[in-house]
Image: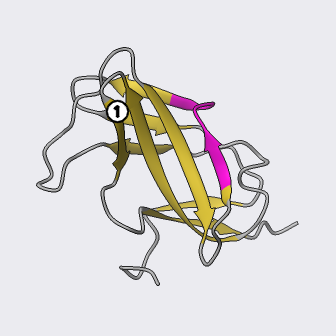
Amino acid sequence: MPRQSTADFTIRQSDTLPRLTANLTDGAGVAVPIPPTATVTFRLRRWGSTVLTVNSATGVVITSTSTGAVRWSPTAAATATTGSYWAEFQVTSATGTRTFPNVETGFWVEITKELG
């Protein structure tokens, strides 16, 4: 069930823009720096499913290691199926793996139907 009335990110079916941007923060809202050698993976899962639709570092750009800013560029395949999804970023470094946001549901992503 969504934790708010509007999605954190909305994109039209099969679109590749806009990009999803996020600032990775801890539970207190403080920016978490990303180690320079870390890999950031974007994960997307449809509500009610246990299967990840996207689980890849492809299309993920770290825009600031010091402020934990990241960006995911969707592919047409990733946005092909309309519906409500949960999304998260996973940072893997030499010291371990950390998931953002640090809540059970993640970001709410809505893929809306194209007109044609």
In the picture shown, does residue 63 fall above or below 51?
A: above
Q: Position of residue 7 (x, y in %)?
A: 46, 70
Seen in the image, is 74 located left or right of residue 4? right
Residue in view at x 32 percent, y 64 percent: 103
Residue in view at x 41 percent, y 31 percent: 92
Identify which residue, 28 or 97, lies in the foreground. Answer: 97
Assess disc 1: are there few (<14), some (14-19) or many (≥20) residues with their C-alpha within 10 Å of its C-alpha: few
Residue in view at x 13 percent, y 45 percent: 30
In the picture shown, does residue 76 fall above or below 48?
A: above
Asked where in the image residue 80 lies, by quadrant, the reply is bottom right
Q: Quadrant of the C terminus?
A: bottom right
Q: Main secondary structure of the magenta part?
A: strand
Asked where in the image residue 46 lies, by quadrant, the reply is bottom right
Identify which residue, 97 or 34, lies in the foreground. Answer: 97
Say what amino acid the circle numbered 1 marks. Gly
Please indicate, yes or no, whether residue 50 appears anywhere in the rendered image: yes
Seen in the image, is 67 located left or right of residue 44? left
* Colouring: secondary structure
Residue 110 shown in magenta: no
Q: Position of residue 25 (x, y in %)?
A: 23, 46
Residue at mark 1: 96
Q: Position of residue 68 (x, y in %)?
A: 28, 33
Please indicate, yes or no, whether residue 19 appears anywhere in the rendered image: no
Q: Furthest residue to the right?
A: 116
Residue in view at x 34 percent, y 32 percent: 96
Residue 58 shown in magenta: yes
Seen in the image, is 21 located left or right of residue 54? left
Q: Which residues are magenta?
A: 53-60
